[in-house]
Image (cartoon, grey):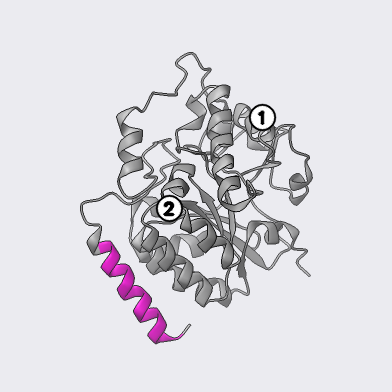
């Protein structure tokens, strides 16, 4: 990317961020299970906060240890794996959780929570494309309904589009019935807009899927539940420098990085993140490409 192009993109990001002052940008505090993601700049966020327990099941069992942010029991969960072979499981049985791709690859997957201001989302995708990279966007269904043009924008550029539930509720606190609904309603939106529900599903409100979530994902036709091994907490808007340093401090060959659309700091961090990956001989590619990579 030329310096001139970067300057234009960054100026656009600053302008969009300035116009959005007073409006919460989309965030995804999965560590604390907060369901405060905005499906759009304002409407989705207020709707979720207005009825935070509307679909919650007060009789539901507490989440298992696989739903904890540190997930110390993940390695003993038969439905959790960091092995590339996990992606071969057939749908309709429980989904298999993927935490990272093959370490033999010379690439990483930058995965994005899909919500927030579409102008910021477009600016981020432009930064990625200028570097010749590709990403995977896990979209919130209500956001896609409000911004249907984003589905075409993402796919036409060679990126990948997947399911991050319909309303971005805190899934470990929901019943199996509501888990099913959140996944299938987002899948319906994806099929309506693109003809496909997408290959990848990521649960909302948690880093790791519970057995209940894995079962629901499988019933919806998803072989995998997508987690990650690198999280710079960009949803908290720590600033571009912090996002860059946190990603580059932990990323390795085969890493799955969790990032967010709708945050100016993340857009501003992209050129340095992509430059840092390139300096290590790592490419940014889609999740499907990462899982297929042999490292050869």
The mark nearer the N terminus, 1 or 2, is: 2
Q: Residue furthest left?
A: 22
Which quadrant of the figure contains the C terminus? Answer: bottom right
Residue at 71% across, 41% down: 223
Q: Residues within 10 Å of mark 2 (few under 14, many from 20)?
A: some
Give the secondary structure at mark 1. helix
Residue at 47% across, 53% down: 148
Residue 76: x %, y % from top left: 69, 33
Residue 73: x %, y % from top left: 62, 33
In the picture of the structure, the residue carrying the numbered disc 2 is 147
Mark identifier at residue 120: none
In the picture of the structure, the residue carrying the numbered disc 1 is 215
- Residue 18 shows in this picture: yes
Give the secondary structure at mark 2. loop
Residue 160: x %, y % from top left: 60, 58
Q: Which residue is more in the foreground, 81 or 23?
A: 23
Q: Which residues are magenta?
A: 2-17
Residue at 41% across, 68% down: 123
Q: Is residue 13 left or right of residue 62?
A: left
């Amino acid at each position: 990317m030329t310096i001139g192009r970067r300057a234009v993109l960054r100026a656009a990001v600053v302008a969009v961020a300035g116009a959005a002052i007073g409006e919460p940008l989309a965030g995804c505090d999965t560590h604390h299970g907060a369901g405060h993601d905005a499906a759009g700049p304002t409407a989705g966020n207020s709707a979720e906060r207005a009825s935070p327990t509307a679909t919650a099941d007060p009789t539901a069992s507490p989440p298992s240890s696989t739903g904890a942010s540190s997930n110390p029991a993940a390695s003993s969960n038969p439905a959790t794996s960091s092995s590339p072979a996990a992606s071969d499981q057939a749908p309709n049985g429980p989904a298999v959780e993927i935490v990272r791709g093959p370490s033999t690859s010379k690439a990483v997957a930058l995965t994005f929570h899909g919500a927030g201001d579409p102008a910021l989302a477009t600016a981020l995708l432009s930064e990625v494309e200028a570097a010749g990279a590709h990403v995977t966007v896990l979209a919130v269904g209500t956001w896609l309904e409000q911004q249907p043009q984003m589905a075409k924008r993402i796919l036409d550029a060679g990126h990948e589009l997947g399911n991050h539930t319909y309303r971005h509720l805190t899934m470990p606190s929901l019943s199996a019935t509501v888990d099913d609904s959140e996944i299938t309603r987002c899948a319906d939106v994806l099929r309506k807009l693109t003809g496909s529900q997408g290959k990848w599903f990521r649960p909302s409100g948690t880093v790791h899927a519970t057995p209940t979530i894995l079962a629901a994902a499988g019933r919806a036709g998803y072989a995998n539940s997508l987690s990650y091994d690198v999280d710079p907490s960009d949803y908290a808007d720590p600033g571009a420098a912090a996002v860059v340093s946190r990603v580059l401090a932990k990323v390795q060959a085969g890493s799955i990085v969790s990032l967010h659309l709708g945050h100016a700091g993340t857009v501003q961090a992209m050129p340095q993140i992509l430059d840092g990956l390139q300096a290590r001989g790592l490419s940014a590619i889609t999740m499907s490409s990462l899982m297929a990579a042999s490292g050869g």
